[in-house]
Image (tube, rainbow, N blue to C red):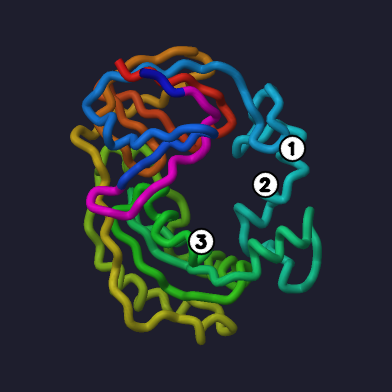
Amino acid sequence: MFYQGVLTKMETEYSNPIQYYLVFENDFININQLLNKNITMQFVKYQCLNCGLDKPIYRQGFDKQCFYEVPQAADWVMRPELSKAHLGIEDRDLEFEKKAQLQPHIVYLANSSNVKVGVTRKSQVPTRWIDQGAHEAIEIVEVPNRYLAGITEVALKEHVADKTNWRKMLKNEIEDENLVEWRDRIKDFIPAEVMDYFIEHNTETNLDFPVSQYPEKPKSLNIVKQVSYSGKLVGVKGQYLIFEDQTVFNVRANEGLVVKITIN
């Protein structure tokens, strides 16, 4: 049995454990059902998520030209503090930017390799935490737009990390933290104009990933260079497939690649 399609980040369902799905144009795979099975993945071609052309992917599933043109890849996506839709100022597409930026956003703490601060749309909770491989997370503030979330993140990352160590996350070298205490400890560093949005009384969310074997020395698979890879799938965490031979494959980092997946 085989499936073929263009890679996009895995869809997830919050359950115990997390359920993962690879969604193609005319089909989907429940990745959890492939655990402890041998699969073969082959690179077929590129397919830009915007124009659909077979051109090398530059970043985020887009070829180089599309990456610098589409609103989904503008600077404010990675740096929320640059958002300007609340001022009516266009970056690349004001209508798109208003829809994306002028909606409730959450600033949160998540613990994947360490405690980090992050920003996501409220509608993306807990999906964002799952994608980062966090085993626990908590909301700090809920604000009405992306800009306010962005300036809060900038202020807080002076006092808490804003990056995940993907190797440590995949090796499951984690320590449980009291995120309620973390939340209360960094409250004083929240910008004054955001303080009214602080979430005073909530508890952390815990996440359980479908992994039977964690890699001691994870090796990242470059499917474009290798063209074909076969291995036994033993886990999924974040957006990574984990194989028995310690190979790991970041699905999200390979968006825009057309692959053929064979279940052996």
> SS of the residue at dot 3?
strand
Task: Report crowding for label 2: few under 14, some 14 to 19, many 20 or more residues within 10 A (C-alpha).
Answer: some
Give the label on residue 120, or none: 3
At 28% across and 29% down in the image, what residue appears? Answer: 34
Between the residue at mark 3 and the residue at mark 2, the CA separation in whole angstroms equals 15 Å
Q: Residue at x 56, y 84 (%)?
A: 192
| Residue 190, image x, y percentages | 50, 77
Q: Nearer the viewer, residue 255 or 1?
A: 1
Observer able to see residue 216: no
User: To which residue does mark 2 refer?
Assistant: 73
Quadrant position of residue 67: top right
Q: Position of residue 137 (x, y in %)?
A: 34, 62
The three-letter amino acid code for the residue at tag 2 is Ala
Q: Earlier in the sequence, mark 3 or mark 2?
A: 2
Range of magenta residues: 4-18
Look at label 3 and name its amino acid: Thr
Query: Do the CB atoms of the residues marked 1 and 2 lie less than 8 Å apart?
Result: yes
Give the distance between the C-alpha atoms of the residues marked 3 and 1, in whole angstroms.
Answer: 24 Å
Label disc, if present, on residue 66 of the rendered structure: 1
Quarter of the image for the N terminus: give it.
top left
